[in-house]
Image: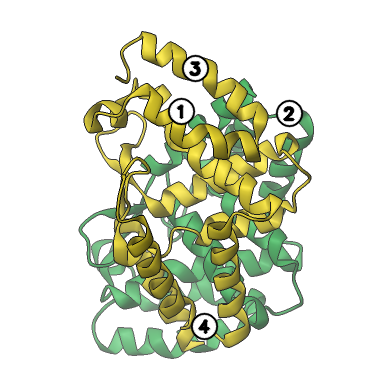
Chain colours: A green, B yellow
């Protein structure tokens, strides 16, 4: 029991990992804990639009654990060009440590979910990834391009980075976003 | 698709519902979105200690949606003595509206989860409730009684409020907390 309590308190740190997107109608930057909650519900709501049939419970659990490695690395904007591999190795070490606080069977379950998300080789991982990539775009579209403008992100960078994974995991979502992104560009919400 | 996007943006408001407990090692009060994420993972980790066998996916989904009604009512400390029924009626109206933004089948799924949690009549709901009640206690124990001291909460109030539901859903967790709460009282972390 004590080890589970320590695990629950350790992951509290994800509430202090700030992302680049602000909470709607707030000056506060969202954190990776509340982001994980939001995309789990986005994915559950989008289930019927998944590219392939998915086990939605697997998707939800994957999304709940996928960012825990950021407790040691912090969040990096998806448009960062370098350092990706070192960062992923550090995240893996972090989640191995944190999930290792749990009983072996439970820890392995969480670690497998984390690895499945990162590998992106199952229908569930691809769909989960689509939800993860789409949510900051949706917040930016609602925020008039807030994090794009603050970070000098251009329309073609967004499309290049997010079109392939979203199209692959949830094609109807990409179809929706494609038009919205062109509209956002026309409005000057990104460069 | 548009209705799902609007749902995902509507629930963003839960990130602005502040609770009485502070994030560990931070001055910031936690919000109900990140709290929902944390207790979903607490429950998943505690599964083997559930009073009865539970469908853990059902528990997790219940915890992810159970606080959404607070978007209109805000969070009320569990020790509040009055107004509970009016508040629950308002929360029900709120989740009926918000889940009603989704396609009927998906909206009904979320609404049923919310109602199941509130009714507390299934093993899953009782276990979910135990996780929900325990987490602020665990944060307070780590925070040296922060929200108890700020709100003048006494040891017997905590025990009266949380012992029955936690014992019912996760007896080993109550056994653990009972000793920790006595220790906290001795340390002056609650009255």
Q: Quadrant of the N terminus of chain A?
A: top right
Q: Quadrant of the C terminus of chain A?
A: bottom left
Residue wearing tag 2: A103
The chain carrying label 2 is A
Residue found 56% across the figure and 41% down from its top:
B131
- Disc 3 versus disc 2: nearer the observer: 3
Q: Secondary structure at mark 4?
A: loop
Taking A171 as reference, is B73 above or below it? above
Q: Nearer the viewer, residue A168 or A52?
A: A52
- Disc 4 versus disc 3: nearer the observer: 3
The residues tagged by marks 2 and 1 sit, at their Cα atoms, a distance apart of: 28 Å
Residue found 38% across the figure and 30% down from its top:
B157
Q: Nearer the viewer, residue A85 or B103?
A: B103
The residues tagged by marks 3 and 2 sit, at their Cα atoms, a distance apart of: 22 Å
The residues tagged by marks 4 and 1 sit, at their Cα atoms, a distance apart of: 39 Å
Taking A26 as reference, is B4 above or below it? below
The residues tagged by marks 4 and 2 sit, at their Cα atoms, a distance apart of: 38 Å
Quadrant of residue B30 within the rendered picture: top left
Q: Are marks 2 and 1 in contact (CB under 8 Å)?
A: no
Numbered mark located on residue B112 in the image:
none
Q: Earlier in the sequence, mark 3 or mark 1?
A: 1
Q: Secondary structure at mark 2?
A: loop
Same chain under badges 4 and 2? The reply is: no
- Disc 4 versus disc 1: nearer the observer: 1
Neighbour class for label 1 at 10 Å: few (<14), some, many (≥20)?
A: some
Left or right of residue A35, residue B169 in this image: right
Numbered mark located on residue B159 in the image:
1
Residue wearing tag 3: B180
Q: Are marks 3 and 1 in contact (CB under 8 Å)?
A: no
């Amino acid at each position: 029991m004590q080890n589970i309590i320590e695990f629950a308190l350790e992951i509290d740190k994800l509430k202090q990992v700030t992302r680049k997107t602000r909470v709607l109608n707030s000056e506060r930057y969202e954190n990776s804990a509340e982001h994980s909650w939001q995309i789990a519900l986005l994915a559950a709501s989008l289930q019927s639009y998944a590219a392939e049939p998915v086990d939605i419970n697997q998707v939800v659990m994957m999304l709940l654990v996928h960012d825990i490695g950021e407790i040691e690395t912090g969040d990096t904007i998806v448009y960062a060009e370098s350092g990706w591999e070192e960062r992923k190795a550090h995240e893996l070490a972090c989640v191995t440590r944190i999930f290792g606080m749990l009983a072996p069977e439970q820890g392995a379950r969480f670690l497998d979910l984390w690895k499945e998300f990162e590998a992106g080789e199952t229908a569930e991982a691809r769909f989960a990834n689509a939800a993860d990539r789409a949510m900051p775009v949706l917040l930016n579209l609602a925020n008039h391009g807030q994090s794009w403008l603050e970070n000098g992100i251009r329309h073609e960078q967004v499309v290049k980075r997010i079109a392939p994974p979203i199209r692959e995991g949830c094609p109807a979502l990409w179809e929706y976003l494609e038009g919205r992104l062109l509209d956002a560009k026309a409005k000057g919400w990104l460069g």
